[in-house]
Amino acid sequence: MDVHLTPDQKAFAHRAIESGRLHSEQDAVQEALALWEERERQRTEFLLTLDDARASLVRGEGRVITQESMHKLADEVKERGRARLLAELTTSR
């Protein structure tokens, strides 16, 4: 495969080669492709997670996140924490 880099890309690769970070332009292209591949893998995983989240909402699971729902959740967590603390204080006497 022939890859043609722009002048800026060539300069970027050459700076990496001169600094010892890379050994050749081919290394630069291979690293770029590896990073692209990783980004695409992460993107695919995120999209699958998003699909799962949407499906769980359709099934009535989970919570729709709004400012109001977050305040309600915070209040619920605080109440559970207070109840747990009270129970621990009561049993430790």
Image (cartoon, helix red, strand yellow):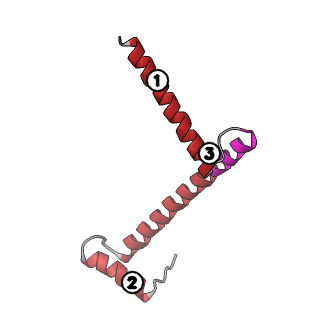
Residue 61 pos. (x, y %): 69, 38
Residue type beneath disc 1: Arg
Q: Position of residue 58 (x, y in %)?
A: 75, 44
Instruction: From the image, state whether disc 2 or disc 1 is nearer to you.
Output: 1
User: What residue do we see at 44% from left, 69% from top?
Assistant: 32
Look at mark 2 in the image and give the residue it sits on.
10
Give 59 or 10, whichever is nearer the viewer.
59
Can see residue 49? no
Mark 3 neighbour density, 10 Å: few (under 14) some (14–19) many (20 or more): few
N-terminal of the pair, mark 2 or mark 1, is 2
Q: Taking 7 as reference, is 85 above or below it?
A: above
Q: How many marks?
A: 3
Q: Could you tell me if the residues under marks 3 and 1 are in contact, i.e. CB atoms within 8 Å?
A: no
| Residue 73 versus residue 87 in the image, above or below | below
Task: Judge whether residue 51 is colored magenta.
Answer: yes
Q: Which region of the structure is painted magenta?
A: 50-60
Q: Quadrant of residue 93?
A: top left
Residue plotted at (53% across, 56% down) = 42
Q: Which residue is mark 3?
A: 69
Q: CA distance from mark 2 to mark 1?
A: 62 Å
Q: Is residue 18 found left or right of 74 in the rendered image?
A: left
- Judging by the rendered image, the residue that carries numbered circle 1 is 84
- Asked if marks 2 and 1 touch (Cβ < 8 Å), the reply is no
Magenta stretch mostly in which secondary structure? helix
Of pointers 3 and 2, the one earlier in the residue sequence: 2
For residue 43, which numbered disc appears in the image? Answer: none
- Marks 3/2: CA–CA distance: 51 Å
